[in-house]
């Protein structure tokens, strides 16, 4: 049995007060282990983005507990959370994912500028770049890349810091079916071969075939699909 | 630094335009400063060249040495203290071969300290009552050495025997001559011995009808000097403030445009202080480049100006202004830095 990387227990998130109060998440519980891809699927406005921000330590839950590598996120200071995001979490976001004025190589060097703990080994990273097919693109700027290439660079960027968990937000948005399969396979490879925990938040059901487990979220209620 | 350099390298046009605008302002500031200093020097450089600490003149003159008349008795009493010199100052007209020049005649005693402090560029200082040494900025062709000129109301022809540097007073070139000649040029009786007494050290106590001025007070009393200095000072000050406002606006717009990218970086765990340092460095690069280019262009412009335009480049003052521009530019980063500190990294999730 692989170790539990992320544990979410009875998490509720409310926004606003009184009559204007909105419950974005209601008593959500889940767990993610290393070497697995967990898909959180749900329609727009279902609360999946709120859940992802809480998993990434970008927001605190109103109630409940989130533990990453057995560390209680609510107990951490903002500075500790920043360090945690830098060292342990790899984000793959759907928009503005890459810094437009940095070349592909510089997107990785930026991590070196701020991160004190070592990044992924050079040889491993070269293998990742080759597998993602972006070795020849390291001197290009994001505006010289296609949508699929950008998403692959974003994945490489997320993996470069050697995180424990990858949190992906709609990684296949605006990609055609061929690219969706490519991204799905990559995420699965990352989980299974590099033993990372991968959480993907999406409304794209085409990614379901690459997931080890799938959670469904509707109106803020999270349930695991059998 | 890492982000700032790469951003400037990628967005050359955008940053080039920002640098151009700040450069034009710094150029204007440097040119105005050199003009202001040039004008100020035309008022004061002669006084500064004497290296005096204080001056005494009549109360009725209200600090204007050209209006002051010391009697023989007053002059004798003021000369008692060591390191004193009696000067006779009068604005007058120098004429030669159809040319007329408004000048300040300053009569000196041969054996007093002021004469030793004059910087003779060529020729020599006057040794007789009918000899003069003129400011080096006067046209040498119109007023050549060994030629004679007439001065004011005096019928005497005065021979030019030398040229003196740093000899401008109250916006006019100075003609140094003998104190004996002063009364006839000014057209006053021989009862008066000079305009003022100047001292290397503090002046002695003086009777009620005389007033003791420090060098600064003496300069500030020059007609129009303070108003002129204040006008230029205000113009330069406003320009520095305008440059700060422009920097703030540009940095605000640039920061607003890249907020989504900065939010992604914050979400990825890049610390706020790293982004803040980059903004400060970016501002430093913009201002420094603008100041260096603006300063260089200003020096080029100033060297091309005709001699009739009074210009003086003081490197310490120029350095202070450059520092002022840099500091106000950095002050302009307060708004964008506040903006960065308020970024919500959660905003990047969910598109």
Image: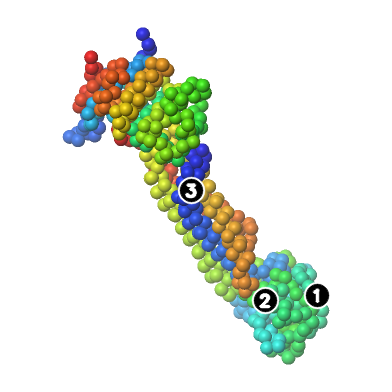
- Foreground mark, 2 or 3, reads 3
* 2 and 1 marks on the same chain: yes
Q: Residue at x 54, y 60 (%)?
A: B27
Q: Position of residue A161 (x, y in %)?
A: 46, 25
Please report contact status of discs 2 and 1: CB closer than 8 Å, yes or no: no
Q: Position of residue A37 (x, y in %)?
A: 33, 19
Q: Residue at x 58, y 75 (%)?
A: B223
What subunit carries mark 2?
B
Q: Secondary structure at mark 1?
A: loop
The answer to whether B184 is drawn above or below residue B21 in the figure is below
Disc 1: which residue: B124
Disc 3: which residue: B12
Q: Residue at x 48, y 39 (%)?
A: B3
Q: Secondary structure at mark 2?
A: strand
The answer to whether B23 is drawn above or below residue B263 in the figure is below
Of A135 and B72, nearer the camera is: A135
Q: Position of residue A21 (x, y in %)?
A: 21, 33
Disc 2: which residue: B173
* 3 and 1 marks on the same chain: yes
* 2 and 3 marks on the same chain: yes
């Amino acid at each position: 049995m692989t170790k539990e990387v992320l544990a979410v227990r009875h998490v509720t998130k409310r926004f606003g007060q009184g009559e204007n109060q909105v419950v974005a998440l209601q008593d959500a519980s889940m767990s993610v282990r290393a070497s697995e891809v967990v898909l959180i699927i749900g329609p727009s406005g279902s609360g999946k983005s709120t859940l992802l921000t809480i998993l990434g330590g970008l927001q605190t839950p109103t109630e409940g507990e989130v533990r990453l590598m057995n560390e209680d996120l609510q107990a951490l200071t903002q500075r500790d959370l920043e360090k945690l995001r830098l060292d342990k979490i790899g984000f793959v976001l759907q928009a503005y994912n890459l810094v437009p004025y940095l070349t592909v190589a510089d997107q990785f060097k930026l991590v070196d500028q701020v991160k004190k703990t070592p990044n992924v080994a050079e040889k491993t990273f070269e293998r990742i770049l080759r597998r993602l097919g972006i070795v020849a693109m390291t001197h290009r700027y994001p505006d010289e890349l296609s949508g699929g290439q950008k998403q692959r660079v974003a994945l490489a960027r997320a993996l470069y810091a050697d995180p424990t968990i990858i949190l992906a937000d709609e990684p296949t948005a605006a990609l055609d079916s061929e690219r969706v399969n490519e991204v799905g396979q990559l995420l699965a490879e990352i989980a299974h071969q590099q033993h990372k925990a991968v959480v993907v938040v999406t409304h794209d059901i085409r990614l379901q075939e690459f997931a080890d487990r799938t959670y469904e979220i509707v109106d803020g209620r999270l349930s695991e699909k059998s | 630094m890492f982000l700032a350099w790469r951003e400037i390298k990628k967005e050359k046009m955008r940053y080039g335009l920002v640098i151009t605008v700040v450069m034009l302002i710094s150029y204007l500031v440097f040119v105005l400063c050199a003009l202001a200093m040039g004008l100020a020097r035309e008022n004061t450089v002669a006084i500064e060249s004497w290296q005096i600490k204080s001056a005494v003149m009549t109360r009725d003159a209200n600090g204007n040495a050209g209006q002051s008349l010391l009697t023989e008795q007053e002059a004798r009493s003021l000369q008692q203290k060591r390191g004193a010199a009696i000067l006779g100052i009068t604005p007058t007209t120098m004429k030669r071969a159809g040319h007329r020049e408004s000048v300040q005649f300053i009569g000196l005693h041969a054996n007093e300290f002021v004469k030793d402090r004059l910087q003779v560029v060529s020729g020599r200082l006057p040794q007789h009552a009918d000899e003069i040494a003129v400011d080096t900025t006067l046209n040498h062709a119109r007023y050549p050495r060994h030629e004679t000129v007439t001065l004011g109301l005096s019928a005497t022809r005065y021979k030019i025997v030398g040229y003196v540097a740093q000899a401008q007073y109250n916006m006019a070139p100075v003609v140094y001559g003998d104190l004996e000649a002063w009364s006839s040029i000014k057209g006053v009786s021989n009862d008066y011995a000079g305009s003022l007494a100047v001292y290397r050290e503090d002046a002695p106590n003086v009777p009620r009808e005389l007033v003791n001025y420090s060098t600064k007070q003496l300069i500030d009393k020059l007609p129009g000097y303070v108003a002129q200095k204040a006008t230029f000072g205000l113009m330069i000050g406003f320009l520095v403030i305008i440059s700060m406002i422009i920097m703030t606006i540009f940095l605000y717009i640039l920061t607003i445009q890249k907020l989504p990218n900065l939010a992604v970086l914050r979400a990825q765990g890049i610390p706020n202080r790293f982004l803040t340092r980059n903004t400060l460095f970016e501002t430093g690069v913009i201002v420094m480049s603008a100041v260096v280019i603006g300063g260089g262009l200003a020096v080029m412009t100033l060297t091309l100006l005709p001699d009739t335009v009074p210009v003086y480049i003081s490197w310490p003052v120029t350095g202070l202004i450059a520092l002022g521009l840099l500091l106000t530019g950095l002050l302009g980063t307060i708004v964008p830095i506040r903006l960065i500190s308020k970024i919500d990294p959660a905003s990047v999730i969910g598109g």
